[in-house]
Amino acid sequence: MNALDKHVLLDCQTWLQQGKPVWLCTILSTYGSAPRPVGALFATDGHIRSGSVSGGCIEDAFMNLIQQHGLDKPLQVFDYGTHLAANGSEYELPCGGHISLLIEHLYPDYCYLVDDWLMAAEQTSTFIRAVNIETEQRSIVTGTETTAYPSPWLTVHYQQHWQLLLLGISQVSEEVARLAIRAGFTVRLCDVRENYSQSWRWTAAEGGVDVEWCSADAFVERYTNAYTAVLALAHDPRVDDMGLMGALESNAFYIGALGSHANSDRRRERLMRIGEYTQSELARLHAPIGIAIGSKTPFEIAIAVIAEVIAVKNGINCDSWHYHHG
């Protein structure tokens, strides 16, 4: 479950605790072109909006239907693409797709439902939310088993496979972490240079990431799987090279290192000499890291880095996009 949808649930929690009613909308399925994935959330207290299930057209129709008392039922399914608007025309996405939505009208007594949902999102990477459209029962179950939920139950799967392992504290690391969390990645950060401890202020208490003080190779070995990107951002061989050697031994889907073309060539030479890696094995390493957008500042570099990671995750070949980062 990504950070945007968690934020929607937190807003719902706040509104319900304030004694306000909440309309919560979940995408159940899509047909054709649709801007948001299954499971995406949108909510409102009738005035303030949170989240998104489209580029704005559905949200506008949603607010109009609330004002027209068209969404007063506790639970209902709304197919945006087959229902008719007030003027007799069919609700339709500009892109031509259809979206099926679960709409829940919640009152403050239902705050526990949102509490349970948030707890599941924080404690497990994979869970199912099941809703019985007839009895109004809701259930959260970890794992992917759905046989216990036949019709009239509706189920939505939430998974958080993708993670970023950041090697080394730096300004770029912070900007990458911020963007990656917004993009739905689980982010972890390590460093062995404890004299840098005062340089990292975006901690978990601030909504960010805590530093794990350990060797980069042990860190990579502990967490890496096929859904992991490993980013060496320290600009320090004591951190970067150790972590990269661990990453090259792993099944990480992406491995990248910050540095200029000259620094990247020297790094490859060191890895070939010390780690005895072949050119073929080193071909997995994206260095210089990031795509060519002319980035200079830490924020711009982070955009280039996250863009490349997402491209590789989505199966796009971006070998020709590498850019020079000092």
Image (spheres, helix red, strand yellow):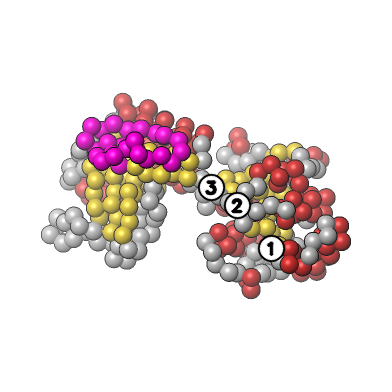
When asked about the image quadrant of residue 231, the answer is: bottom right
Residue contact between numbered discs 2 and 1, judged by CB atoms under 8 Å: no
Left or right: 94 as drawn, with respect to 244: left
> Residue 4: percent from the left, percent from the top?
46, 47
How far across and down, in percent of the image, does residue 255 sit?
68, 58
Residue type at mark 1? Arg
Name the residue at 69% across, 63% down. Answer: 284
Count numbered badges in the picture: 3
Badge 3 amino acid: His
Residue 239 percent coordinates (x, y): 79, 49
Please tell me which residue is depicted at 42% across the width and 30% down the height of the picture. 115
When the figure is inspected, residue 317 is found, relative to residue 249, above or below; the finding is below
Residue at x-position 69% and y-position 59%: 256
Q: Disc 2 and disc 1: Cα gap in Å?
A: 13 Å
- Which amino acid does the dot numbered 2 rest on? Ala
Marks 1 and 3: in contact by CB < 8 Å? no
When the figure is inspected, residue 113 is found, relative to residue 96, above or below; the finding is above
Disc nearest the viewer among 3 and 2: 2
Which residue occupies 30% across, 62% down?
A: 97
Can residue 167 be seen here? The reply is: yes
Instruction: Sort mark 3 into few (<14), some (14-19) or many (20+) by Cα contacts within 10 Å.
Output: some
Residue closest to the far left = 88
Tell me the residue that label 2 is attached to.
226
The magenta region covers: 130-154
Residue 269 figure quarter: bottom right
Q: Secondary structure at mark 1?
A: loop
* Earlier sequence position, callout 3 versus callout 2: 3
Indicate yes or no whether the magenta region holds residue 43: no
User: How far apart are labels 3 and 2 at the CA level?
Assistant: 9 Å
Which quadrant is the C terminus positioned in? Answer: bottom right
Label annotation for residue 284: 1
Residue identifier under label 3: 161
